Amino acid sequence: MAGSINKLTDRKLKSVLGLPAERESKLADGGGLMARISKNGAVSWFFRYRLGGRDTEPYRLNLGKYPDVTLKQAREMRDQCRSWLAEGKDPKLQLKLIKSESLKPITVRDAIHYWITEYAEDNRANVKWHKAQLEKHIYPFIGDMALSDCETRYWLQCFDRMKKKTPVASGYVFQMCKQALKFCRVRRYAICTALEDLTVPDVGKTQAKKDRVLSEREVGDLWRAISNENTFIPYYNSLIKVITVFGCRTQEARLSEWKEWDRDEWIWTVPKEHTKAGEKIVRPIPEGLRNFIEQLYSETQKTGLLLGEVKSSGAVSQCGRAIYKKLGHSEPWTMHDLRRTLATHMNNMGIAPHVVEQLLGHAMPGVMAIYNRSQYLPEKLDALSKWVERLDVLAGNHKNVAILKVGEK
């Protein structure tokens, strides 16, 4: 049977190509593949097959003309057709489906989805937020439009709707879409330059840089309130305590699982999928927080989650924006401001900047990011221990205690 397959050669085909003949003829390559030579010397490929056994009428499927479809390509198409037949599928219908799919234009949704699956899911910590914003503000209006037909004006209509209520979010979504289209263009998946000439001010606002730092009195008020378990509901009480001590991002605590917490070595390792920079963060757990961690473990261990559940980022943000009022502070602040507060007060205490940056999970600058892979665990533990001591003093939990700078005895 093997000898009856692949009988033709390019030499044979070229010898008859373009030569007039008295009548039409056929050359078999085997396996159902045949070349038909017309009277004027045109060579066409077709695949001959049956559906339902030898007693049924044969079908003839046109595969294209030679040499546009090479001998090698024709054989590959024949083999694919034979595989379809083995699966009980009609090759004619399968080819039609493939052609239909290949001719289908790439839509706005297709292009952005390509960026999400090929880049964002592995490199963006808040990809769920991206998807939610796209489903709400982009896809319902232009998602099914062919990317090549989606002119700048159609994009602007989406962003203009957004910026009336949420101008900062509009600017953020614009930057995300612009990056997605550039990613598709660089990788030759789809070409669209509709957003190239636009900037954030054209579609919304850039988030203003914040410089809010809680004063020592405000920090003391917060730590005192956390110590009183009736101030906040248990979930938020624990969340705020973790953020205040470690200066971590809300997401790192909100998504934290108990498997990240080594209660023998007293180390919290935040996995890269929970961090903004996509790099794991290792933080020692100061002694002043260990009783709290043990108590929390006894309450939530069955869930596998540090806080017992995962509340949405929106719910957590809403709660955070109201804390300053609950504590009687005149100037608003958010949970994210607690990171800046920790960094500022630690630097004022004399803690080395590189230790503070590592606690915050920031990337090390320059060549340090490449060559210096130290986690500075002793230095971090020393810094966090002194920070918890300071929090207790500011809250009035310890009387007549002098706060030493790091390195002092």
Image (tube, rainbow, N blue to C red):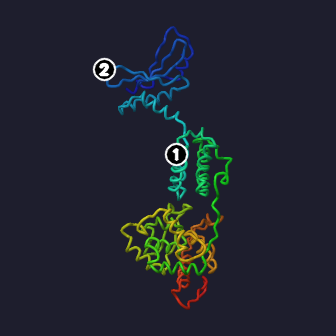
**Which of these two is toward me, 247 or 188?**
247
Query: What residue appears at the point 49 percent right and 27 percent down from the top-left corner?
Result: 74
Vertical position of residue 266 compared to residue 367: above or below = below
| On-image quarter of the C terminus | bottom right
Measuring 67% from the left and 49% from the top, which residue is drawn there? 198
Which type of secondary structure does the marked residue at label 2 adopt? loop
Nearer to me, 392 or 61: 392
Spot occupied by residue 226 in the image (x, y as percentages of width and height): 48, 78
The residue that label 1 is drawn on is 140
**In this rendering, does residue 7 appear at all?**
no
Q: Which residue lies most toward the bottom here? A: 400
As drawn, which residue projects farthest toward the right?
Answer: 197
Quarter holding the N terminus is: top left
Q: What element carries label 1?
A: helix
Other residues around mark 1 within 10 Å, as few (<14) / some (14–19) / many (≥20): few
Task: Count residues near mark 2 (Cα–Cα under 10 Å), then give few for <14, some for 14-19, many for 20+.
Answer: few
Identity, as a three-letter code, of the amino acid under mark 2: Asp
Picture residue at 35% right of the left edge, 31% below the top = 88
How far apart are the two marked residues, 1 and 2, measured between alpha carbons? 52 Å
Spot the residue most to the top.
Answer: 22
Q: Name the residue under label 2.
A: 55
Q: Earlier in the sequence, mark 1 or mark 2?
A: 2
Q: Which of marks 1 and 2 is in front?
A: 1
Residue 300 — which label? none
Query: Residue type at mark 1?
Result: Pro
